[in-house]
Image: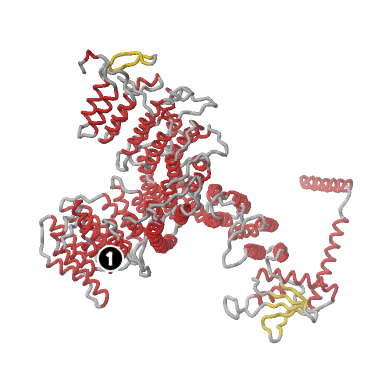
């Protein structure tokens, strides 16, 4: 304690603040800082201050203020003690709720913080966040604090910021959890006059937004990021805090993070750019600055929208040329903005999707190469523009190291490009721009010519500035990384001659080698496809590493034996590989010792070549040296066996595939924590070989691991891992569909749905988070400046759905269809209802018509599979129901194949009238267009199929009615006309047999109708010569029409060949007259029979009497029989 002046209050608190500030500038440690602080806060007495009694240091004139607390916080933060800052704050700030004060240490000295204190503390926590920090367990603040808080605000009072954020928080970032506790200590603002609203200003909100955005970027376990941002912005408006340019820029960053949060959708609207535009027009918002534009351009980069990024950059340039006004809104671009725009040129890598076929992925990769070349052209033009703006306009846009590095990293320099990476490096040297290791590495990777790569490596050794920087920083690994990139480039291209030169150059110039160097050498030998040579190399290097050097004579002989002695190019390649291996052997002392990863990589290369013998040999040597194989190595064994089972070599048998699948399963089950992608590959191998139970066991293993990591919060499942799970599920169900195994498909579906239910139940700690009305309590008008971001945060949900997807339900439907279970097939179709409805024209949002049409076409095979299964089981009623449901869901014409299948089952069961009704339903004009194959119209295909089906099932009258309906609507051709000589001509070209039958019958009726008016005439029927028949010049229609006229008409109609035209038949007029007269006679006979029937109809009394007589006669017969 301090013992002077008899403890009279003679000192001012600021003296201690200045003392702490002075100590902070020295090398004083944390203990010394705390000792000074404790000196001020521990010796206390109770005094009355401002009408209240509180603890005050006995030697101070007044209580400590926020200034002293601020100095201490900054001093502790400068020494990396961010947690200590939070503890000090808690120690000297009372909790506003008396029921919670027992949870915190009673402060010896109470200090009221100001806005600077809060913003400083939030900034300290933000700076301490790092991607490699340990994750903490999430805290459910809504459960632990809810009971102790004061009752919720009334409908006229908005909830405090702490309550909003606490109800939404579920984070593995301890800094954010500390923020929630700090806001809880600050409490609600009781004084409406604003006396206690000291911490409500732009600095506090900006620092809080920075922390939230950073936590959202770095932590997968930090959930509800957009909702948290919206709550902070809402609180600003509640407290009448007009956002400044810093806050608006942070809002732009938050909108870029909130871009694609809605599950199952892909939004193309750039909310960040929209908000930037609003900053330029809204009177309450500040004008954007360079940082605002840079944040919006970065949002464009995340959405792969480089065109919008370039437009924003050009907008900045044009604003500088506009006439100056009182409010100068010009924003001059600088080098940083240009570099951000260059980042927008970088296309994201292609992720494999379960719904994408391999050919689609290959096409996308080809497009990516074309896009990279286009990005190179744009990047080079931007580089020229930067230099022009700097020299001609005086902008601060002179290119720097980041500029050139970005151009090299996003581009691909082909042979057609005049500017090469080497020229860019020379340009950097000429302009005095520093080159670093990243510059040379990206230059190597961006090159496509091996000669350019060799020149870049030589330039690296000749660059004295770069070498001097490496020596000053003592980072020899930078130079090694450049040469490793060259080794990997040459190994990928298979240029072993330049590999030798590069390795020899590294040894000559004493470039340090590392583990990556050895990896590049191993992959280079593996690229040659000679697993035996790789095994011998690894054995040799392993012996050198363990001090067990052996004679190299056997090594060289074995290598030469397998290097190929054939002449030509293959022999040259084999000799080059052998010479390269000998060079590696001669410089073995230069290379670092082999470690577990090197052995594992060599094993992976052998397994990639499906050489299990040499892979096991390397594994045996690895174990003989006491080195345990890594988990990745064993996963590679399992994956290699599985891939061999899935795509077995040509000479292998089904027994080999089954054996490989069993080996893969045993290894996967023995692994402690395998990757879901590896287990998924093994599961698929088991399914391919018919081991459904083992596949299900592995699927449950994957589900269990994901749920376990999610419950422990130590390893929150990443989007990539969930995508791997999704892909495994789809592939397993797809295999069930391919093999028609419905039992396994139902088991997998049940497991997937159960897993999705458990996963989604942990999506939020409290389901009330999603329905909390705090974000909607503030009813805003058209002046709501955060309306765009508010729309995004209205929907909560995971980005990646782990349940059944449309493709999975389709696989289940196809499996049921192949297995013949029409009930499962029909019921499973109902699960596609929401997905089909999303393709309806009235439900389209911001997706393009092409995208929606593609999604619809992916769903249509499900309906076809269901209806065909119903057809095979003669379930005509359910077939019609499926078609009608699909029309209602999609608002489109159903797939022609499905409709024709329903028509066939209706025809086979004699429901001809239902066929006509179904046709009318499917060809409605209000339905959307349906794509067809082979250029045949949709309606034409349906009518042809309907007539054919009805004809094949003997429903000739219904077939003729459908034919005439198709002709009347213009969907079917019917060429029947009268010649100048009075004869009628019927042309059957292009018609099949069923249509030809209907056409002949209809033509005969029309000919008969014309007979009553014009008299008897001949009729010519053109059948064609059979040029388009399956067997050329062997017509089908001609004999079929002749048979029809002879067998189906009475009296039979004879035909004559037309002289000089073997593709035509003539029916004589008198034969047609005889047929017509017979038809009239039969019609008269039928009318007489009908009259007799009508004459026999009796009145009611005669009918009763007749019935009574019949009953009496029956009774008499029974009596006689009984007597007999």
* Residue 642 image offset from top left, x and y in percent: 33, 56
* Residue 134 image offset from top left, x and y in percent: 30, 39
Residue 576 shows in the view:
yes
**Crowding at label 1, few (<14), some or many (≥20) Cα neighbours within 10 Å?**
many
**Which quadrant holds the N terminus?**
top left
Which quarter of the picture shows residue 79? top left
* Residue 388 image offset from top left, x and y in percent: 39, 60
In the foreground, 490 or 61: 61
Q: Secondary structure at mark 1?
A: helix
Which quarter of the picture shows residue 1058? bottom right
* Residue 280 image offset from top left, x and y in percent: 50, 46
In the figure, 411 relative to 274: above or below?
below
The answer to whether residue 25 is left or right of residue 1020 is: left
Taking the spot 37% from the left edge, 40% from the top edge, the residue there is 215
In the figure, 879 relative to 1049: above or below?
above
In the figure, 1097 relative to 1021: above or below?
above
Q: Which residue is mark 1?
A: 453
Taking the spot 40% from the left edge, 26% from the top edge, the residue there is 186
In the figure, 5 relative to 79: above or below?
above
């Amino acid at each position: 304690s301090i013992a002077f002046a008899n403890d009279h209050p003679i000192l001012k608190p600021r003296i201690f603040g200045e003392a702490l500030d002075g100590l902070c500038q020295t090398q004083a440690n944390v203990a010394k800082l705390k000792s000074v602080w404790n000196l001020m806060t521990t010796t206390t007495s109770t005094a009355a201050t401002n009408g209240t009694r509180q603890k005050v240091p006995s030697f101070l004139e007044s209580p400590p203020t926020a200034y002293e607390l601020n100095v201490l916080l900054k001093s502790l933060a400068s020494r990396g003690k961010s947690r200590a800052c939070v503890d000090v704050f808690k120690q000297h700030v009372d909790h506003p709720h008396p029921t919670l004060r027992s949870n915190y240490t009673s402060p010896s000295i109470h200090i009221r913080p100001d806005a600077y204190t809060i913003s400083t503390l939030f900034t300290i926590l933000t700076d301490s966040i790092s991607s490699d920090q340990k994750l903490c367990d999430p805290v459910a603040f809504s459960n632990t604090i809810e009971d102790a808080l004061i009752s919720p605000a009334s409908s006229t009072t908005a909830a405090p910021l702490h309550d909003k954020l606490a109800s939404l928080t579920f984070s593995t970032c301890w800094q954010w959890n500390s923020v929630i506790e700090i806001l809880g200590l600050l409490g609600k603002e009781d004084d409406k006059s604003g006396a206690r609203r000291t911490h409500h200003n732009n600095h506090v909100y900006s620092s809080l937004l920075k922390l939230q955005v950073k936590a959202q970027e770095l932590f997968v376990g930090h959930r509800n990021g957009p909702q948290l941002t919206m709550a902070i912005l809402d609180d600003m408006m509640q407290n009448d805090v007009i956002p400044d340019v810093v806050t608006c820029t942070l809002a732009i960053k938050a909108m870029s993070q909130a871009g694609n949060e809605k599950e199952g959708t892909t939004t193309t609207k750039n909310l960040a750019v929209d908000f930037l535009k609003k900053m330029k027009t809204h009177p309450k918002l500040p004008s954007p600055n360079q940082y605002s534009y840079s944040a919006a351009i970065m949002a464009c980069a995340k959405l792969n929208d480089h065109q919008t990024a370039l437009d924003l950059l050009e907008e900045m340039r044009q604003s500088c040329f506009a006439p100056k006004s009182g409010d100068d809104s010009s924003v001059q671009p600088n080098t940083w903005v240009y570099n951000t725009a260059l980042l927008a040129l970088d296309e994201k890598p292609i992720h494999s999707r379960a719904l994408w076929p391999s050919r689609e992925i290959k096409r996308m990769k080809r497009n990516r190469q074309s896009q990279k070349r286009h990005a190179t052209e744009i990047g080079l033009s931007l580089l020229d523009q930067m230099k022009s703006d700097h020299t001609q306009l005086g902008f601060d846009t002179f290119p720097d190291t980041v500029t050139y590095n970005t151009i090299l990293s996003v581009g691909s320099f082909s042979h057609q490009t005049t500017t090469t990476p080497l020229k860019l490096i020379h340009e950097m040297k000429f302009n005095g721009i520093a080159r670093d290791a990243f510059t040379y590495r990206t230059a190597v990777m961006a090159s496509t010519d091996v000669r350019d790569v060799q020149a870049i490596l030589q330039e690296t050794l000749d660059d004295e500035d770069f070498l001097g920087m490496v020596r000053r920083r003592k980072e020899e690994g930078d130079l090694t990384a450049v040469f490793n990139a060259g080794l990997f480039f040459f190994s990928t291209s298979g240029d072993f001659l330049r590999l030798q030169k590069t390795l020899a150059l590294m040894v000559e110039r004493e470039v340090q080698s590392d583990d990556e160097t050895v990896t590049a050498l191993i992959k280079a030998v593996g690229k040659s496809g000679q697993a035996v040579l790789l095994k011998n190399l690894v054995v040799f290097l392993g012996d050198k590493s363990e001090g067990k050097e052996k004679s190299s004579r056997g090594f060289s002989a074995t290598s030469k034996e397998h290097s190929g002695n054939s002449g030509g190019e293959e022999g040259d390649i084999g000799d080059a590989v052998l010479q390269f291996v000998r060079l590696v052997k001669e410089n073995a002392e230069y290379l670092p010792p082999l470690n577990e990863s090197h052995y594992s990589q060599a094993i992976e290369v052998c397994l990639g070549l499906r050489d299990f013998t040499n892979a096991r040999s390397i594994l045996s040597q690895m174990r003989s040296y006491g080195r345990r194989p890594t988990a990745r190595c064993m996963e590679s064994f399992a994956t290699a066996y599985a891939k061999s089972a899935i795509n077995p070599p040509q000479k292998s048998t089904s027994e080999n595939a089954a054996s490989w699948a069993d080996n893969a399963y045993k290894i996967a089950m023995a692994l402690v924590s395998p990757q879901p992608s590896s287990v998924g590959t093994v599961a698929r191998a088991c399914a391919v070989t018919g081991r459904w139970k083992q596949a299900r066991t592995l699927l449950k293993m994957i589900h269990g691991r994901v749920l376990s990591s999610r419950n422990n919060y130590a390893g929150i499942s990443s989007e990539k891992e969930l995508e791997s799970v999704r892909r495994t599920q789809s592939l397993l169900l797809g295999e069930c569909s391919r093999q028609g195994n419905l039992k396994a498909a139902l088991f997998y579906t049940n497991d997937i749905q159960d897993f999705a239910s458990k996963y989604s139940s942990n999506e939020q700690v409290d389901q009330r988070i999603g329905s909390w009305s705090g974000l909607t309590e503030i009813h805003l008008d058209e002046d709501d400046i955060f309306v765009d971001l508010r729309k995004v945060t209205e929907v909560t949900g995971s980005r990646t759905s782990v349940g059944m997807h449309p493709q999975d339900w389709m696989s289940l439907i196809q499996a049921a269809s192949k297995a013949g279970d029409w009930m499962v097939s029909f019921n499973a179709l109902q699960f596609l209802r929401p997905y089909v409805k999303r393709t309806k024209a009235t439900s389209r949002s911001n997706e393009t018509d092409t995208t929606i049409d593609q999604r619809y076409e992916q769903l249509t095979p499900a309906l076809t599979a269901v209806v065909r299964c119903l057809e095979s089981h003669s379930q005509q009623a359910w077939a019609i129901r499926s078609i009608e449901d699909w029309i209602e869901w999609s608002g489109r014409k159903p797939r022609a194949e499905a409709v024709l299948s329903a028509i066939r089952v209706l025809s086979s069961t004699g429901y001809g009238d239902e066929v006509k009704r179904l046709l009318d339903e499917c060809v409605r004009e209000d339905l959307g267009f349906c794509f067809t194959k082979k250029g045949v119209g949709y309606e034409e295909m349906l009518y042809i199929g309907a007539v054919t089906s009805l004809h094949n099932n003997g429903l000739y009258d219904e077939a003729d009615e459908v034919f005439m309906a198709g002709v009347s609507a213009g969907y079917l051709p019917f060429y029947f006309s009268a010649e100048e000589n009075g004869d009628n001509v019927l042309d059957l070209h292009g018609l099949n047999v069923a249509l030809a039958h209907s056409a002949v019958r209809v033509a005969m009726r029309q000919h008969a109708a014309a007979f009553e008016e014009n008299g008897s005439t001949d009729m010519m029927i053109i059948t064609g010569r059979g040029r388009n028949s399956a067997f050329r010049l062997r017509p089908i229609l001609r004999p079929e029409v002749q048979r029809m006229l002879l067998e189906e008409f009475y009296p039979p109609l004879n035909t004559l060949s037309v002289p000089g035209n073997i593709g035509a038949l003539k029916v004589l007029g008198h034969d047609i007259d005889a047929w017509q007269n017979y038809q009239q006679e039969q019609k008269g006979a039928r009318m007489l029979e009908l009259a007799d029937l009508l004459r026999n109809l009796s009145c009611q009394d005669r009918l009763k009497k007749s019935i009574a007589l019949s009953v009496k006669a029956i009774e008499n017969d029974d009596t006689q029989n009984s007597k007999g």
